[in-house]
């Protein structure tokens, strides 16, 4: 149960921050900093942008930046998919009675 709570970002216990979770999020930030040295194409393959990595590193320590990056990347993929699906649909114009 503890790991699932950490992964979801629920870090408060009796009104205080749960210190192991804060330390975990700090470690995740240290690993994410390595992404700043990665080429743009690799970040793109991962579904990320450099600005999103900077954004995640600026989140409070009570938030798991890897989880938030994953959510953001998934939202962008969903939006891109919806755009491609809608773009592929043909617009059907109603036939007016005068044209018939």
Image: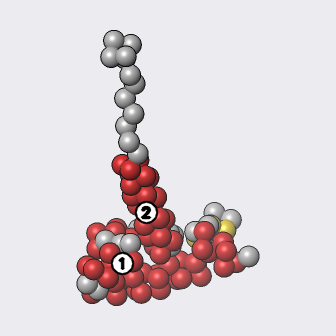
Residue drawn at (59%, 82%) of the image: 20
Picture residue at 58% right of the left edge, 68% below the top: 9
Of 89 and 66, nearer the camera is 89
- Look at mark 1 in the image and give the residue it sits on: 45
The answer to whether residue 57 shows anywhere in this view is no
Above/below status of 27 relative to 79: below
Which sits earlier in the primary sequence, circle 1 or circle 2?
1
Question: Residue 100, how many percent across, how many down?
Answer: 37, 16
Q: Is residue 19 above or below residue 70?
A: below
Q: Secondary structure at mark 2?
A: helix
Which image quadrant: the N terminus? bottom right
The residues bearing labels 1 and 2 have C-alpha atoms spaced at a distance of 12 Å
Estimate the x, y position of residue 76 in percent, counting from the top left: 40, 60
**Residue 44 shows in this picture:** yes
Question: For mark 2, does the 10 Å Cα neighbourhood hold few (<14), some (14 to 19), or many (20 or more) residues?
Answer: few
The percent position of residue 93, horizontal first and vertical second, equals: 37, 29
Residue 77 numbered tag = 2
Q: Considering only vertical position in the picture, is 21 above or below 62?
A: below
Q: What residue do we see at 38% from left, 22% from top? A: 95
Q: Is residue 75 left or right of residue 21?
A: left
Most extreme residue toward the right is 1
Residue at 38%, 72% in the rendered image:
47
Q: Quadrant of residue 54?
A: bottom left
- Secondary structure at numbered mark 1: helix
């Amino acid at each position: 149960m503890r790991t699932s709570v950490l992964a979801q970002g629920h870090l408060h216990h009796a009104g205080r921050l749960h210190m192991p979770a804060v330390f975990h999020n700090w470690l995740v930030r240290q690993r994410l900093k390595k992404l700043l040295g990665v080429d743009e194409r690799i970040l793109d393959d991962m579904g990320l942008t450099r600005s999103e990595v900077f954004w995640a590193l600026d989140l409070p320590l009570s938030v798991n930046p890897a989880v938030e990056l994953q959510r953001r990347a998934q939202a962008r993929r969903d939006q891109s998919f919806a755009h491609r699906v809608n773009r592929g649909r043909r617009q059907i114009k109603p036939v007016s009675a005068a044209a018939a």
